[in-house]
Amino acid sequence: MASNTSEPENQHGKASAAGNLVGGHVVSARATVVGLLAIVLWSFMAGTVRIVAEDFGATLGSALIYTFGGILLLIFRRPAPLREFPRKYLIVGGLLFVFYESSISLSLGLASTAASSVEVSLVNYLWPTMMVLLTAAVSHRHHAVLKVLPGAIVATAGVALAVGGNSGLDWHAAAQHIAENPLPYVLAFLGAFAWSIYAVFTPAWSQGVDGTSLFFPCVAVALWIIHFTSGEGLPATMPGPLAWLFVLVAAASIGGGYACWGYGILHGSMERLAIASYATPVLSTAASAVLLGLALALPFWCGVALVVAGSVLNYLVTARK
């Protein structure tokens, strides 16, 4: 993988004819592709995490996944020395990263039913829309937010249809679930907002230093604290080798995804990555269906069409500068 510092990337950017200077750093087409790879890796996240949760429990499974993921990142993508991290990025960026991961884990764990879990996931999947709108807001282009808003609405409706419709989501029941147990939904919303802020603003804060490999083990520590304070403890009988294999697969998928995403947002095109991020929930739903042996219903494919239409609209808007 690529270096954590900006110097090698700047050298590569100078040598690349495709590079453009945006936001004070050279935008590399290669880095954008690496960022897009994160979306593919994340598509396996929901299905593998669900399989791990069935074997180990929700909180223990998450703690194990992030522990193994953190170890893999420390082995294959060692973080830069602490003295190289800008203080704002290290503190604010680190807190946003840990808060997002912890809030998503907690929100799914606090969801009382399987239907509530789908609803919480939908709230979490607001982060691509928030990213697109925030990216437009900080671009300083005239009416940028208004221009991307139609595409964002269409794509968000597609995400809701693809993820919720395929699960037979009852929107009236969802409103009741929110009224009865609002905490997981609030956590999912705040987590999505925190992640959109992290993705949009950390490229400027980081000065080219990627903290993914440093933040990831911090998430593992937070999840272990959550697990043991929840009173669940360790299972009486540990699952077999296949269950541990899925822990490794989930860790590699999530850890590798964040490593690629971190590199992509620091050195690639934030606008392209924000638009492409709409594919995350769609690919995740499709991959989960394959892993769990589920059929993809018509609402899913209608949702895919809307996501594509909304993404194309936003791409055309951002392409006209």
Image: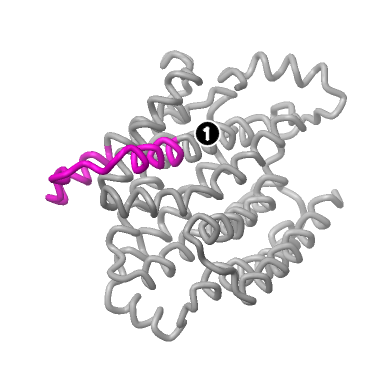
34 vs 114, left or right, is: right
Q: Nearer the viewer, residue 274 or 159?
A: 159
Q: Nearer the viewer, residue 43 or 96?
A: 43
- Residue 241 within the magenta-colored segment of the rendering: yes
Number of numbered tags placed on the structure image = 1
Q: Which quadrant of the figure has residue 120?
A: bottom left
Secondary structure under tag 1 reads helix
Q: Which residues are magenta?
A: 222-251
Residue at 43% in and 86% down: 172
Q: Position of residue 285 (x, y in %)?
A: 55, 60
- Residue 65 within the magenta-colored segment of the rendering: no
Q: Main secondary structure of the magenta part?
A: helix
Residue position for label 1: 256
Q: Position of residue 31 (x, y in %)?
A: 69, 31
263 vs 115, left or right, is: right
237 vs 102, left or right, is: left
Kind of residue sitting beneath label 1: Gly
Residue at 46% in and 53% down: 46
User: What is the crowding at mark 1: few (fewer than 14 residues within 10 Å), some, or many (at least 20)?
Assistant: many
Residue 22, compared with residue 61, is above or below; it is above
Q: Position of residue 62 (x, y in %)?
A: 33, 45
